[in-house]
Amino acid sequence: MLDRRRFLSTATAGLAGSLALSARLFAQLEKIPPLPDHSLLDRNEDAYWAEMRKQFLIPEDEVYLNNGTVGSSPAPVLRAIFDGYTTTEKMDQQDPEDYPIWGYAAWNEFRDPLAAFVGCTRDEIALLRNATEANSYIANGVDMKPGDEVLMTDQEHPGGEHPWDLKAKRYGIVVKKVTLPRPVKDAAQVLNLFNDAITSRTRVLFFSHITTFSGVVLPARELSALARSKGILSAVDGAHVPGMMRLNVPDLGCDMYSSSPHKWLMAPKGSGFLYVRDEVIDRLWNTIATEGWDDVKIRAERFQRIGSSNVPALWGLRASIKLANDIGMERIERRHRQLADYILDAMKTRGAESWTSPDPALRCAIVSVNVPPVPRMDLENWLWKTHRIRIRGGDPYKLRLSTPYYLQKKDMDRFLEKFDEYKREKKLA
């Protein structure tokens, strides 16, 4: 048992450690230079992106190639989070019924910029924690009977697939999958696979806008139109899209859309959203029920009413949207494509089998290659522990390489050099 003196000593040490950590973090942020002048983009684009690299706490000697899992939040986003805590934790809100943990608010100050960013109305969007949560809302919220089918790809993230598996196990619906080619050649290939798999029992088409497995950009607009033409709901897992590519959700024509802006928009972890087309909102049941759960007048807001919430994370989300808008999503998307094409071409010259689509419209900032006999996990550990290069992949031989806009050519060249070195060292060349 911990006696009082030891407890106080331990607690004091813990507090001191936390304060020291906070001080170090603030000190790091103080050292980060101001954002580069936007005019530098036109004068010297490479210099601009090199300056943007300084906005991230990622150490200079680290090469980060895994935005496909999670992005690092840049300084403006981190500062906004701290500002959020500083403001809310004073407990001095003008309204005596307003509290910083409030989970019953419209949060229009955060929903409005997000809705504008993805092209929808405020009433069609709910602020959640990530795409997994939003996908669970979709799977739990759609009425389906035993034997009804949801049709998806074989490249879905567990956070997209398993909510439907749970529904299947509990309620007897059927989960069907189409097998995507590696690589997907063109959009027609995908449309034909889905069209041929639809039956009279298909009720929902669920698919990733960009798959986590190979990074293929699926033809979301065409698939949504196919679903609509057959009276089927379309639900899109867009975890990778905001911040990677330009996005106008209503233009896709889908009924529901989920996302995790902590990846490519580099928003705070724990900030996500669910879009529900206005005509469909009243057909979707709530997963979490609290005050307002059955109030149709508040539209999609009822899906974000979850009780106590991390409001400062929303401050960071808003800052990440502003940063992307200031840079320009057209420029960001173009940069993503250029970097990905560079590393894809370099890997193909090394004999890698590309699982990335040869169609430029079906790829962006994720490159997926198969590199037998190089063991993925051993390479991943060697790169990180020996050379501070971070990648992700899948066993046995798949590598997934993400190319965030601040990545430098020298960073990709360093990865390629070490990849070659690993093969020589292990006698796999």
Image (spheres, rainbow, N blue to C red):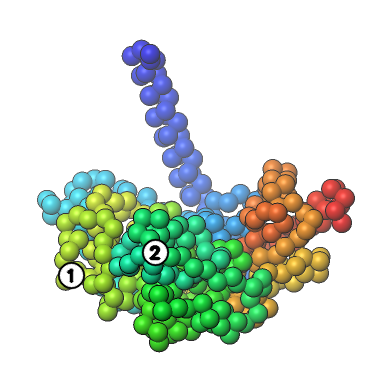
The secondary structure type at the circle numbered 2 is: loop
The percent position of residue 347, horizontal first and vertical second, equals 76, 66
The extreme left residue here reads 96
**Is residue 371 placed above or below 223 in the rendered structure?**
above
User: Which of the marked residues, 1 or 2, is nearer the chain's N terminus?
Assistant: 2
**Is residue 134 placed above or below 121 in the rendered structure?**
above
The numbered dot on residue 145 is: none
The percent position of residue 35, horizontal first and vertical second, equals 50, 63
Q: Residue at x 42, y 70 (%)?
A: 149
The percent position of residue 378, horizontal first and vertical second, equals 72, 47
The percent position of residue 374, horizontal first and vertical second, equals 77, 54
| Label 2 Cα crowd, 10 Å radius (few <14 / some 14-19 / many 20+) | many
State the residue position of label 2: 173
Q: Residue at x 81, y 66 (%)?
A: 351
State the residue position of label 1: 296
Residue type highlighted by circle 2 = Ile
**Residue 12 versus residue 189: which sits nearer the camera?**
189
**Residue 141 versus residue 10: which sits nearer the camera?**
141
| Nearest-to-viewer mark from 1 and 2 | 2
Q: Is residue 203 left or right of residue 386?
A: left
Q: Residue 122 is drawn in which quadrant?
A: bottom left
